[in-house]
Amino acid sequence: MIKAVQYLPISREIEVLLTDDSRHAWRVDNLEMVINVDGKIKPLPTPTREQLIDVIVYGGGAYIYWPQIDQMFELEALMNGVYGRESWMKRLNSTVAA
């Protein structure tokens, strides 16, 4: 479970401290942030530094949540390398492999 979370602006990473005192970080640019517009999923415009700094632990430590941009990510998914929907992961993995 997540004990604390913070956004690191210089590296553009989200860092979590777990209850076992281990630290983990993910690049925010690798996380699929989306909005629902008229029933269609669309990419969220690039969040500002201020929006990304406003991140909290949510759901008893199971999630990280950005209230200003209404984005939530499950710790278990992040730990398993899942940062978005299947199509996002395919695109992300193709750029890493290149």
Image (cartoon, rainbow, N blue to C red):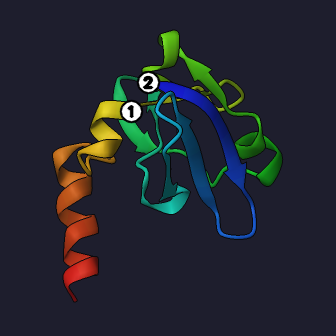
* SS state under label 1: helix
Camera-nearest residue between 70 and 1 = 1
Residue at (34, 43) in percent of width and height: 78
Q: Which residue is mark 2?
A: 1
Q: Which mark is residue 75?
A: 1
Question: CB under 8 Å between callouts 2 and 1?
Answer: yes
**Would residue 81 be found to the left or right of residue 69 on screen?**
left
Camera-nearest residue between 74 and 90 = 74
Rendered position, 97 above or below 93: below
The type of residue carrying mark 1 is Leu
Quadrant where the C terminus sits is bottom left
- Residue at the outermost front position: 20
Question: In the rendered image, is residue 94 in sight?
Answer: yes
Please state the horizontal and vertical placement of residue 18, each as a whole percent of the image. 50, 34
- Residue at the outermost right position: 50
Residue at (59, 49) in percent of width and height: 15
